[in-house]
Image (spheres, rainbow, N blue to C red):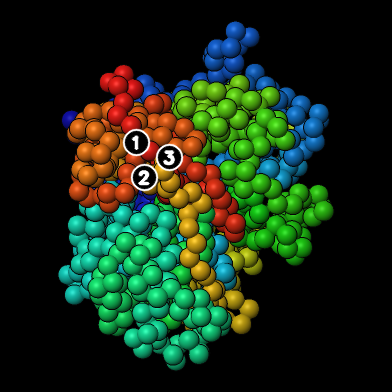
Amino acid sequence: MRTETAAPVDTHCPYCSLQCGMGLQPGAGGVEVVERTAFPVNRGALCGKGRTAPAVLSSRVRLTEPLVRSPAGELEPAGWEEALDRVSTGLAGARAGHGPDAVGVFGGGGLTNEKAYALGKFARVALGTSQIDYNGRFCMASAAAAHQRAFGLDRGLPFPLADIPGAGCVILVGSNLAETMPPAVRYLTELKENGGTLIVIDPRRTRTADQADLHLAPRPGTDLALALGLLHLVVAEGRLDEEFIAARTSGWPEARAAAMAHWPELVERITGVPLPQLRRAVALFCDAPASMVLTARGPEQQSKGTDTVGAWINLCLATGNAGRPHAGYGCLTGQGNGQGGREHGQKADQLPGYRKLTDPAARAHVAGVWGVDPDALPGPGRSAYELLDALGTEVKALLMMGSNPVVSAPRAAHIEERLRSLDFLAVADVVLSETAQLADVVLPVTQWAEETGTTTNLEGRVLLRRRALDPPPGVRSDLDVLHGLAARLGREKGFPTDPEEVFDELRRASAGGPADYSGITYGRIAAEDGVFWPCPDTARPHPGTPRLFLDRFATDDGRARFVPVTHRPAAEEPDADYPVLLTTGRVLAQYQSGAQTRRVDELNTAAPGPFVQLHPQLAERVGVAEGSPVAVVSRRGRAVAPARISTDIRPDTVFMPFHWPGAGRANSLTNPALDPTSRMPEFKVCAVRLEAAPADG
C-alpha cells in the first residue's frame, strides 16, 4: 500500500541573520531538513548549524516543563500556573517595593518580530518600566547609530545580497563570512567570477581572507585610523566624486579636514598596515565602476564603533558609492532577528516602527494603538550592559527572554554576580542555559519549528517562519507567557497569543514610522519570498523597498550627512603588565553563546571547546606549545584554553572564540567600555597577558 508523505513546510533557519530558507519534512521521528532551492537568499545551501537545527527540538536536550527554585535552592519541576504566579509575584513585588524601574526586561535578537513587539509592550504597559533592552545591543548597535547619523535610517543592508556580485570591488571589514554565514560566501565567489575584487580587513587570516585579492591585517582597535587613511589617499590622489558630494551630501568640508589629519605614514604606524597596501586598496576601490563597504562586528564592537563605521560611510560618500545600484555601505547583522528585534520596541529608546521614544508624535501614535495615555509610557531606559550592571542595586527583579549573558556579556563574571544578586530572576528559554540555571523560575518556551512568526533578515526582508510540528505538552509560546503574566498584573486585554493577530497590531503600530510594516501581511510574505520594508499600506499594494536611497536619503533634506571623525586609541591599550591584544569571534560549528549549538553532537565534534590562537613568536615568548593550556589574563578575569599556534594571526594579538562557559569563557576577559553613542561594549579589543597554565587549568 502506498503511503502519502506530507509536503515539506517552508520555513527558515533559526540561527543567523541570513535566515536561510529551508523545508521541514515531518515524519514519525520528528522533522528532517530538506533544501528549499527557490528561496533567493541561500538557494538551498545550508551550513552545518542549519542542517542540524532539528536536533535541539529533541526533549533530550531542551526544556519541557517549568522549573522553580525550591526552599533548598534547587530547580524543581512545577506546573505552569504555579510558575506564572511566582513570576508575576516576583515582578509585582519589586515594583511595589521600589517603583516600576526596579523591574527590568531583557530580550533577545532571536525572538520573532511578534515576540519582540509584545515584550516591549509588556515592559512599558503591563510593568510600566523603562528598563528594557536586548542582546542585539551587543550585535550591530554601532552600525545602526552610524546609519542614523549619515542616512537618517538604519537598515543593515540598504540593498539585497544579490547586488553584491554586481559590484566592482567589495571591502569586507571585520567579518569572517566563511565561518559566520557560509551560504553568503557564494555572493563573494560570484563577485570574483564577474571580475570584481575583494578586500578583507581582519587582524587574522581567516577562511574568508583566503579568498581576498587583498588582505589587510590591522592592529585590533585601529579600523578607524585605517578608514581615515584611505579617505586621505582618496583626496590626495584626486579620486573624489565631486559631483555626487555636491548633489547628494552635506558636511564634506569638516569630514575632509578630519581625514586629512590622518596622513598615510601616520596610519601605517598606527595600524601596522604597509603604505603600499593602503594605496592598492584605494586603487581597487576607486578604479571599480561601483564599490561597496560591508562591516560586521570587528569595527563595530569597539568603544569608538559608531565613529569607525562613520569613517567607512564617509569613504563611500566621498567616492560616490552610495545611493546607486551595486554600490554603498551595508552592515552584516549577526543575530537571526537582530534587525527586526530592535525595530519594534525591545530597545531601550525605541518604539515599534523604529520610532523614537522621546518623540511626542511617536508616543501618541503607539499609545493610540495600545489604548493607553501617551504620558503613561515611560521614557528611555538603560542600554543592555548598563541594565545588566544595575541588577541587584537599582534593578531588583528581571524577566529575561532568549538571552544568555552569563556567557555572552562583557566582563561576564561581574554580570554573573549581578544576576545572582537579584531579588528575583525569571528566564524564558528553549534550553537550560547558564543564565537560566541561576533563575528563580525557568519557563520552557517554543522554538522556531514549533511556532509561526516573522523575522527580518539582514537585507530588511520580512520573512515567515511556519510551524511544522507541535511542541511538547509542557511547553508554551512566549506570547502565551506574556499573556498569562499581563493578566496576573491587571492587563487582561492587549496581549493576544495568536502571532498573526500580534503582527496585525504591529503593522498598525509601525504605520508611518521609519520601519513601516503596515503593508506587509502573512499572505504577502508567503507569496513573495518575503517583503522588504519600508512597505506602507497604500491603496495600490506597495511593492516593498529592496533598495533604499536611490533617489534621496532619509534625512530631512534628502542628503547624506558626512560626520567628521578622528582616530582615538582603544579604551584599553597594552602596557608592561598586559602587553598583548585580545580579539574575539565565532567559529563555524558554534553560534553566539552556544546555548543551543553546544547541545548538538555533530557540531560539538567539529568544535568541541575553546582555544587561544596565537602566533609562533608569541607562543615561544610565553613558552607554550601547540595544544598545551595557556592562561589569558585581563584586568577583569582569567580564561584558560588550549593553544592553537598559527601564522594566520598578528604576533601582537591573540584570538578566542566566545561560545563556551567555564574556564574557557572568553567574555571573562572582555572590556565593557561603551561607545558613547551606541552604548556598544568594546568586545573586540582589550589588553591581556599570557601565561603557561598547568594541565588542570
Secondary structure type for disc 1: strand
Between 621 and 126, the one nearer to me in the picture: 621
CA–CA distance in space, label 1 to label 3: 10 Å
Mark 1 vs mark 3, foreground winner is 3
Task: Please name the amino acid that badge 2 sits on.
Answer: Val
Mark 3 vs mark 2, foreground winner is 3
Check the image and report above or below for 258 versus 64: below
Check the image and report above or below for 615 versus 312: above
Task: Please name the amino acid that badge 3 sits on.
Answer: Asp
Task: Please name the amino acid that badge 1 sits on.
Answer: Leu
Q: Where is residue 288 in the image (x, y as percent from the top left)?
A: 27, 80
Q: Name the residue under label 3.
A: 577
Image position of 401 (left or right of 25): right
Secondary structure type for disc 3: loop
Image position of 226 (left or right of 6): right
Residue in the image at 55% along x and 55% along y = 675
User: Which labelled disc corresponds to residue 690?
Assistant: 1
Between 456 and 90, the one nearer to me in the picture: 90
Q: Position of residue 436 (x, y in %)?
A: 52, 26
Q: Name the residue under label 2.
A: 580
